[in-house]
């Protein structure tokens, strides 16, 4: 049986190779370990290898896990990468360090208002609907500049960049296209004067393509923790 520690080593090798192929320094990309559906013990195993950043999708599950892992030192850095509803913003503002899935001003305003005064600003990415399907969450490229301007003005948030979940594609060339669109969208916002530094893109199946297109943070679940149980239909 392959262990989580071995998987993390393998993912780090993939990341290093991808950075080298892209002519980027090996530390240019942060590895976010996506621990959704995994028990706290799995997070402990990853933490023991030095992994510090963890991504969660479901607020309730994440809160239970964060509490179960409250003894870890230094405290893990918790990233919310799943959809966020207005009635859950307060606990998220209190418990998370990052939110990648902001796609509406109302959610951002609530997070800013509810971020506790004793904590640093909440780090935020805007989720972009890069593949353009009606069903997926994320702001459209057309609406992105106005949302980015508004979010960047909120006092208790720091807008860091953009996140996307592209449609799966088979080969690296096809995988690169949506990642390139996201990078171009980030560059356009920076050209308008926003100080952004984060491109949250790349998952287990397409991290190489994402790194080639400039990802600064890849979100890796399956390649670290193994296949997730399918949700009951
Ligand atoms: C589950 C998930 C991931 C991780 O996907 P893998 O294919 O398991 O690496 C990354 N990002 C988001 C938003 C996810 O929901």
Image (spheres, helix red, strand yellow):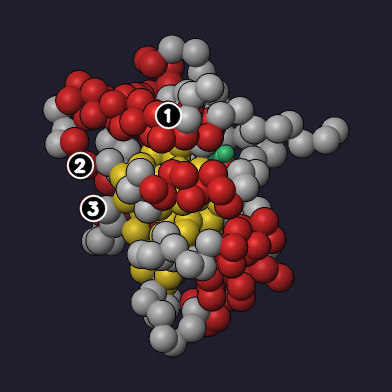
Crowdedness of circle 2 by 10 Å Cα count: few (<14), some, many (20+)?
few
Crowdedness of circle 1 by 10 Å Cα count: few (<14), some, many (20+)?
some
Mark 2 vs ligand 1: CB under 8 Å?
Answer: no
Give the residue drawn at x 28%, y 26%. Answer: 13
2 vs 3, front mark = 2
Q: CA distance from mark 2 to mark 1?
A: 19 Å
Q: Is residue 216 above or below residue 105?
A: above
Give the residue drawn at x 67%, y 68%. Answer: 88
Quadrant the C terminus occupies: top right
Q: Residue furthest top?
A: 171
Nearest to N terminus: mark 2 or mark 3: 2
Q: Is residue 42 above or below residue 64?
A: above
SS at mark 3 in the image: helix
Give the residue drawn at x 21%, y 42%. Answer: 28
Residue 148 horizontal/vertical position (percent): 41, 61
SS at mark 2 in the image: helix
Residue beneath disc 3: 191
- In the rendered structure, the answer to whether residue 117 lies left or right of residue 63 reads left
Indicate which disc residue 7 carries.
Answer: 1
Q: CA distance from mark 3 to mark 1?
A: 38 Å
Query: Which residue occupies the foreground of this view, 36 or 175?
Result: 36
Q: Is residue 212 visible?
A: no
Q: Quadrant of ligand 1?
A: top right
Nearest to N terminus: mark 2 or mark 1: 1
Quadrant hosting residue 122 = bottom left
């Amino acid at each position: 049986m392959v262990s989580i520690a071995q998987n993390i080593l393998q993912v780090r090798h993939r990341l290093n190779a991808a950075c080298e192929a892209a002519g980027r320094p090996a530390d240019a990309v942060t590895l976010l370990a996506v621990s959704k559906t995994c028990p706290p013990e799995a997070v402990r195993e990853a933490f023991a290898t030095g992994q510090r950043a963890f991504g969660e999708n479901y607020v309730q599950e994440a809160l239970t896990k964060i509490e179960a892992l409250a003894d870890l030192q230094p405290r893990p850095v918790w990233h919310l990468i799943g959809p966020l509803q207005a009635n859950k913003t307060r606990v998220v503002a209190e418990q998370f360090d990052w939110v990648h899935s902001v796609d509406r001003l109302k959610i951002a305003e609530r997070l800013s208002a509810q971020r506790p005064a004793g904590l640093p600003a909440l780090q935020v990415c805007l989720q972009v609907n890069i593949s353009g399907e009606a069903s997926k969450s994320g702001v459209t490229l057309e609406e992105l500049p106005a949302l980015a301007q508004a979010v960047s003005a909120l006092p208790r948030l720091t807008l860091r960049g953009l996140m996307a979940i592209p449609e799966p594609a088979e080969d690296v060339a096809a995988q690169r296209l949506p990642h390139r669109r996201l990078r171009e969208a980030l560059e356009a916002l920076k050209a308008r004067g926003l100080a952004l530094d984060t491109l949250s893109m790349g998952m287990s199946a397409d991290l190489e393509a994402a790194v080639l297109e400039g990802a600064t943070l890849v979100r890796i679940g399956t390649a670290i923790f193994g296949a997730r149980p399918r949700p009951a239909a």
